[in-house]
Amino acid sequence: MVALRIGFVSFLAVFAYGDDFSDKIRPVLNENCAKCHNPANPKNRLNFLKATAATDVETQRSLWRNVATQLRNRTMPPGAAKMAEADRMDVANWIEARLRSTGCTSSEYAGFVASRRLNRREWKNTIRDLFGLDVAAPDLFPADESGGAGFDTNGETLYVPPMMLERYLEAATTVLDRIVVTPPYNKVVLSHELNPVTAPPKGIKPSRFVDPGTELSTNVSVFAEGAYTIRVSVERPPVTPFSLKVKVDGVEVGTLAYARDSGGGATARVATATLSRGAHTVTVVNGTERVEFYSVTVDQRPAPMAAEKRALHFQLLGLEVGQSPVDPRVAARRVLRQVMPKAFRRPVDEAEVEQFLALYDRGAKRGDPFEENVKLALKAVLVSPRFLFKVEEPDGRPGIQRIGQYEMASRLSYFLWSTMPDTELLQLVGAGKLQDPAVLAAQVDRMIDDPRSRMFANGFIGQWLGTQDVGGRSMPPLT
């Protein structure tokens, strides 16, 4: 990591520009601009010739940036002044270099920093450190725009088109479905709860007895994609054998054959279907016999579950798979209090927690399982701008302010590791120590020595030199 440390120090170095202002720059400006911009001229509106030293330039940054722009555009001084082209470029270059070199050290100026969205590398790493889950970000998101500079961390090019909003919702659902295990779906619909698709004859009320060709349906909303069984039970089948058809969303998934009445009670037959997450309509179409229906049951077929998923479920919820909390709302609040400060990379207050807990409440009122309601609240966390963007907010005081410690921790962590701050960084922030120069230097050393700093080396150098795609490209055969 020695090379990385040397490169990092060089990257942060502030280059000192010699103070040629008094000897070279000011004389040229006086010679070409004093006629209109003499400080003693009452008509002078741009009083930049009052500057006597280079330090006066950075104290009036907007004024001097305007001077450099006018010189580069050749709009000032007017053509009659006949300013030498070499002098014009020398002065403009010197002003711009001076403004750049003092941009971070001037006490009266702070540059604008665009809020940077997490690029897909940072999103992947943050999800890993937040939940302990590795996901393939390239499968979820398109490549990030890099702009003219060629880097995918450029805030001005990391915009969020509508397609990305959809991808973030899909990605949040994918992540939470891989972590939280929802109890298997089961819904029993009795005959009187089935909806007739074909209305009964006028004057005849719907009953358990269904005429030939009649269609009955029910709506189901399943929480996970997978295999489901659709069990149709009938009472006292007719004497002759008969059959029913089962459809899901209008597509036939099976034909159920029933033997003649054996003198017993309800008789059931089963069809299977693969359902995606969401709402579906299950329809039963009667055959050629008048049948007395009993119920339609939709069950999720159990699937093998890896030990890793059980561990992730317990780590997040503090519950074993299938275990119900004593107080579901209290348990949901605890999960949000655990996840939100890490996801937002700063402390959260009770009002913020309540905003996301309201989504849990909405699902609970519908009667959805506890696990699904928690996932709904966490999905909102993962698509929140507080998670997707590295937000830096002033504290409300007027004037220029020093960057906050939580923001500093995020800048350090995403710059060197491409992920969220770790526990040690956040503990130092909580103790108010991260802005101490000695502590900050020690943390930079620690973070560079950490294997995660390879994310900086690979990402920055690979994009700088254009080598990140070399391994994925095929070379033509040598001839």
Image (cartoon, rainbow, N blue to C red):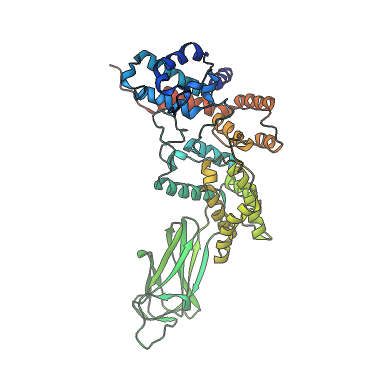
Q: Is 63 situated left or right of 109 in this image?
A: left
Depth check, front residue: 442 or 184: 442
- Residue that protrudes farthest toward the left in the picture: 479
* Number of dots carrying numbers: 0
Q: Residue 406: x and y, percent?
A: 62, 37
Percent x, y of residue 214: 36, 77
Position of residue 81 relative to residue 357, above or below, is above
Q: Where is residue 175 in the image (x, y as percent from the top left)?
A: 52, 47
Which residue is pictured at 53% across the width and 56% down the height? 302
- Whether residue 131 appears in this view of the structure is no
Q: Quadrant of the rendered structure where residue 71 is? A: top left
Indicate the quadrant containing the N terminus: top left, top right, bottom left or bottom right: top right
Residue sitting nearer the eye, 64 or 194: 64
**Residue drawn at the location 42% of the way across and 28% of the way down:** 43
Q: Where is residue 154 in the image (x, y as percent from the top left)?
A: 46, 33
* Quadrant housing the C terminus: top left
- In the shown orientation, is residue 457 left or right of residue 72? right
Establish if 207 lies above or below 49. below
Q: Can residue 23 be seen in this view?
A: yes
Identity of the residue furthest to the top in this view: 23
Q: Which of 236 and 392 is in front in this view?
A: 392
**Left or right placement of residue 182 versus residue 231 in this view:** right
Q: Which residue lies furthest to the bottom in this view?
A: 203
